[in-house]
Image (cartoon, rainbow, N blue to C red):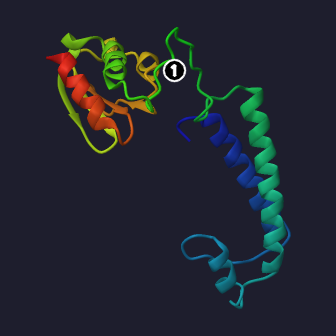
C-alpha cells in the first residue's frame, strides 16, 4: 500500500467491482476471521448462506483479473514494487561477492558507502546485520553499500543504518571495526 499507492487504488476498485458482482448474483456467506477456505466451509452450512459453491469460481476469476490488471499497471507505469527498484550500476558493483573470504574488502566498501570512518559513531551486529550509528545520514550511499554484495540496507532511525550481510556478519563486523580504529 505504501510502496505503490496506485496499486492500492486499483485494488480497491477491483475489490469493489467483485463485491458488487457477488451481491448482484446473490452469493451469501459469512466469515469470522479470515474469509478463507475454512470460513467458507463452515459458513456454507448456515441457514443464511446462499450459492456458496459459486464463490470459488468467482474467486478464481478475481485472481486472474487482479493478476493481469496488476501486471499491466506495474509494467505500463513502471511502478517501483519490491525487486523492481532502479539500481544504478556503480563501477565496482558486485565485484566483491559476500561469498568471498575477503571480509576486509567488503568492510572497506561498506565503510566508504557510510561516508568514511569519521561518520561512524558506533558499530554493533546481530546474527545477520551490521548495525551502525552514523553522524550524518546524508553521507550514507545505499547503492555504494550494496556494491559490496550485501543483501540490503535499512535505515530504521535518524542516525541508524543496518546493513544486511547474512550469517557471515561477524567477520565483516570485525574487519569493519579494525578499519574504524
Seen at 25% across and 28% down, the residue is 132
* Mark 1 surroundings: few (<14), some (14-19) or many (≥20) residues within 10 A: some
Left or right position of 28 against 161: right
Residue 76 against residue 53 in the figure, above or below: above
Left or right position of 151 against 103: right
Residue 42: quarter of image: bottom right
Seen at 46% across and 21% down, the residue is 96
Residue 135, position in %: x, y? Answer: 21, 17
Residue 8 against residue 157 in the figure, above or below: below
Residue 121, position in %: x, y? Answer: 16, 21
Residue 54, position in %: x, y? Answer: 84, 74
The furthest residue to the left: 181
Residue 75: quarter of image: top right
- SS assignment at label 1: loop
Seen at 72% across and 47% down, the residue is 13
Residue 42 against residue 83 in the figure, above or below: below
Name the residue nearer the viewer: 135 or 13: 135
Name the residue nearer the viewer: 112 or 53: 112
Name the residue nearer the viewer: 152 or 33: 152
What residue does disc 1 label?
94
In the rendered image, is residue 169 in sight?
Answer: yes
Quarter placement of the N terminus: top right
Residue 94, position in %: x, y? Answer: 51, 20
In the rendered image, is residue 135 in sight?
Answer: no
Seen at 26% across and 11% down, the residue is 116
Residue 181: quarter of image: top left
Amino acid at each position: 500500500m505504501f510502496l505503490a499507492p496506485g496499486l492500492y487504488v486499483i485494488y480497491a476498485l477491483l475489490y469493489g467491482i467483485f463485491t458488487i458482482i457477488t451481491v448482484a448474483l446473490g452469493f451469501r456467506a459469512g466469515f469470522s476471521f479470515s474469509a478463507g477456505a475454512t470460513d467458507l466451509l463452515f459458513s456454507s452450512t448456515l441457514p443464511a448462506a446462499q450459492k456458496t459453491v459459486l464463490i470459488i469460481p468467482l474467486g478464481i476469476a478475481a485472481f486472474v483479473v487482479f493478476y493481469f490488471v496488476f501486471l499491466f499497471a506495474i509494467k505500463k507505469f513502471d511502478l517501483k514494487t519490491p525487486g523492481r527498484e532502479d539500481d544504478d550500476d556503480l563501477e565496482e558493483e558486485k565485484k566483491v561477492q559476500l561469498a568471498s573470504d575477503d571480509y576486509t574488502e567488503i568492510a572497506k566498501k561498506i565503510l566508504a558507502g557510510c561516508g568514511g570512518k569519521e561518520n561512524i559513531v558506533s558499530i554493533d551486529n546481530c546474527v545477520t546485520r551490521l548495525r551502525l550509528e552514523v553522524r550524518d545520514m546524508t553521507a550514507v550511499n545505499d547503492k555504494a553499500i550494496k556494491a559490496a554484495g550485501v543483501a540490503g540496507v535499512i535505515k530504521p532511525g535518524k542516525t541508524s543504518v543496518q546493513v544486511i550481510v547474512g550469517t557471515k556478519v561477524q567477520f565483516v563486523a570485525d574487519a569493519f571495526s579494525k578499519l574504524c580504529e
